[in-house]
Image (cartoon, rainbow, N blue to C red):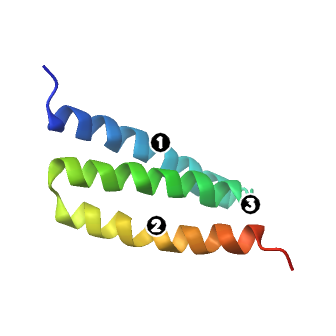
Amino acid sequence: MTTSTDHSKKFKWAGTVFVLTGILLTNLNIYPANILIHGLGAVFWTVAGYLAKDKAIMTNFSLQLPLFVVGLVNAFAIN
């Protein structure tokens, strides 16, 4: 039987892969993929925080989400 802790760990590892990949893409100046991938990692970490009932993780990553949305809107805005 899987518990919310097991699910939380899976979301944390997936989120970690996406966040680190997003950071790598930022360092390689691959834009806007860096924002999209890093933002996806933040979503996974937010879900992990919710499942683990960890308010610090939820606060950190959920507050990053609007920043990624602003970056994506800016990247795809028609001038």
**Number of the label disc, if any, that sits on residue 67:** none
The answer for how far apart the CA atoms under marks 3 and 1 are is: 18 Å
For the point 58% across and 51% down, the residue is: 37
Q: Nearer the viewer, residue 5 or 24?
A: 5
Left or right? Give the position of 73 relative to 42: right
Neighbor class of circle 3 (other Cα within 10 Å; few <14, some 14-19, many 20+) is some
Q: Are marks 3 and 1 in contact (CB under 8 Å)?
A: no
Locate residue 26: give its quadrant.
bottom right
The residue indicated by pointer 1 is 17
Q: Residue furthest right?
A: 79
Where residue 75 appears, x then y in whole percent? 74, 69
Where residue 13 appears, x then y in whole percent? 36, 39
The answer for how far apart the CA atoms under marks 1 and 2 are is: 17 Å
Mark 3: secondary structure: loop
The answer for how far apart the CA atoms under marks 2 and 3 are is: 17 Å
Q: Is the residue 65 above or below the residue 40 in the image?
A: below
Q: Is the residue 24 above or below the residue 10 in the image?
A: below
Where residue 2 appears, x then y in whole percent? 16, 25
Where residue 77 appears, x then y in whole percent? 77, 73
Locate residue 76: give its quadrant.
bottom right
Q: Residue furthest bottom?
A: 79
Q: Amino acid at mark 1?
A: Val
Q: Nearer the viewer, residue 66 or 27?
A: 66
The residue indicated by pointer 3 is 31
Q: Amino acid at mark 2?
A: Leu
**Number of the label disc, if any, that sits on residue 65:** 2
Neighbor class of circle 1 (other Cα within 10 Å; few <14, some 14-19, many 20+) is some
Q: Amino acid at mark 3?
A: Tyr
